Image: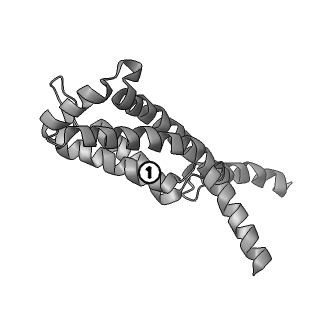
Amino acid sequence: MTAALHEPNRRARALLSMVFSTRPTTRASDAALIAVRIVLAWIFIYYGAGKLFGAFNGPGIHQTSLFFSNTAHLHPGGFFAVLGGIIEFGGAIALVFGLGSRLAGLALFGDQVMAMITVTWVNGINSESLTPGYEFNMALAVMALVIVFLGAGRVSVDALIERRFSRSRLSTG
């Protein structure tokens, strides 16, 4: 009879433990990392392809070059336009597959820090003008840092390479 009385307490403790746990399970971490990778890839494919190819009604390389020269004061504008487009588009593709994810995340973090420094910082965190503030850049930069610090997770090419590397080390060692 006493076991039946303690059952609701166990369920309540288990629920509270799950809600307030600070140690994520591996599956929860993998799910969160997949979500972050997908969101970052989606956004950066959009902006990178717009810069490089004019996709999604983007400015294309020529207009991006002019923007980088005139607004961001990055010279030569063409070099930085191509560099920014490759970092964004290439980094996004790397995140989709989880290949070189930490390096891609670091490059995307740097890309967003540069965007804040050169363009959006002067507008503040929530611009009241047509030009945006730096809140979007900050959110993207922090999500990229999540990938830098945690990696791509178990559902990635990085994890496959790591598993193959550790197996070959075990068989030769």
The residue at 72%/54% (across/down) is 10
Quadrant in the picture for residue 121: top left
The residue at 20%/36% (across/down) is 68
| Above or below: residue 106 compared with residue 58 | below
Q: Quadrant of the C terminus?
A: bottom right
Q: Quadrant of the N terminus?
A: bottom right
The x and y percentages for residue 100 are 53, 54
The x and y percentages for residue 26 are 65, 55
Element assignment for label 1: helix
Is disc 1 surrounded by few (<14), some (14 to 19) or many (20+) residues within 10 Å?
many
Front-most of residues 125 and 1? 125
| Above or below: residue 17 compared with residue 75 | below
* Residue at the top extreme of this rendering: 57
The x and y percentages for residue 3 are 83, 56
Q: How many marks?
A: 1
Q: Is residue 140 left or right of residue 134?
A: right
The residue at 38%/51% (across/down) is 107
| Above or below: residue 55 compared with residue 171 | above
| Above or below: residue 9 compared with residue 39 | below
Q: Is residue 117 left or right of residue 22?
A: left
Q: Which three-letter amino acid code belongs to the residue tagged 1? A: Gly
Q: Is residue 131 left or right of residue 41?
A: left
The residue where tag 1 is placed is: 105
Q: Is residue 14 left or right of residue 112?
A: right
The x and y percentages for residue 67 are 19, 31
